[in-house]
Amino acid sequence: MAMSGGSDDGAPMMEMNMTPLIDVLLVLLIMFIITIPVATHAVNIDLPQPNPNDAQQDIDPVKNKIVLTQNGEILWNGEAINQGQLVRNLQLTRDIEPEPELQFEPEPLASYDLSAKTLNIIKASGVTKFGFVGNEQYRTFGK
């Protein structure tokens, strides 16, 4: 945007000043960009519904035992489950009257991280009858 000095002959300048026009156009462009709604994308998926009768057979109404193996598996009464199934089983045990006892026994070489995550899941589920079992095998140091 160069400035022309014009001639000193006293004639009026015939060129239009473009600076205010460009400023107004830039402000309008920014206002239009701000007012455009953010595009939201949603993908609707029909997920299968769980069958509540399938989970009932895995839960003992008296006591249930969670064992963590050194291979990183979670065993519920001897059957391997994942963390989602553990949450579901814990919710179902809370609905049983009286609430069954939940026993927790990690193997000696089980992952500490898996133990901490499993204990957080158990704590978040709100289970009230909970106990650690199998600690008697560690009574003697170095055994």
Image: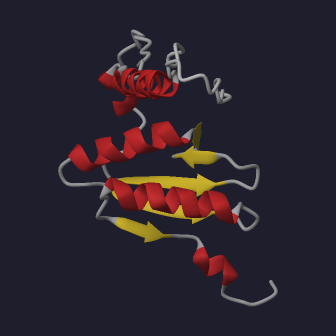
Q: Locate residue 92: give its quadrant.
A: top left
Regarding residue 59, the answer to whether it shows in the image is no
Q: Is residue 28 left or right of residue 96?
A: right
Q: Nearer the viewer, residue 91 or 93?
A: 91
Q: Nearer the viewer, residue 136 or 69?
A: 69
Q: Is residue 59 above or below residue 54?
A: below
x 38%, y 30%: residue: 55
Q: Is residue 85 left or right of residue 88?
A: right
x 67%, y 65%: residue: 112
Please state the horizontal and vertical placement of residue 109, each as a whole percent of the image.
76, 64
Q: Is residue 107 above or below residue 22?
A: below
Q: Is residue 16 above or below residue 120?
A: above
Please state the horizontal and vertical placement of residue 29, each as a whole percent of the image.
44, 21
Regarding residue 42, the answer to whether it shows in the image is yes
Please state the horizontal and vertical placement of residue 40, each as a whole percent of the image.
41, 19
x 63%, y 57%: residue: 114
Name the image quarter holding the C terminus.
Answer: bottom right
Name the image quarter holding the N terminus.
Answer: top right
Please state the horizontal and vertical placement of residue 42, each as a whole percent of the image.
42, 15
Q: What residue occupies the far right of the structure in this picture? A: 142
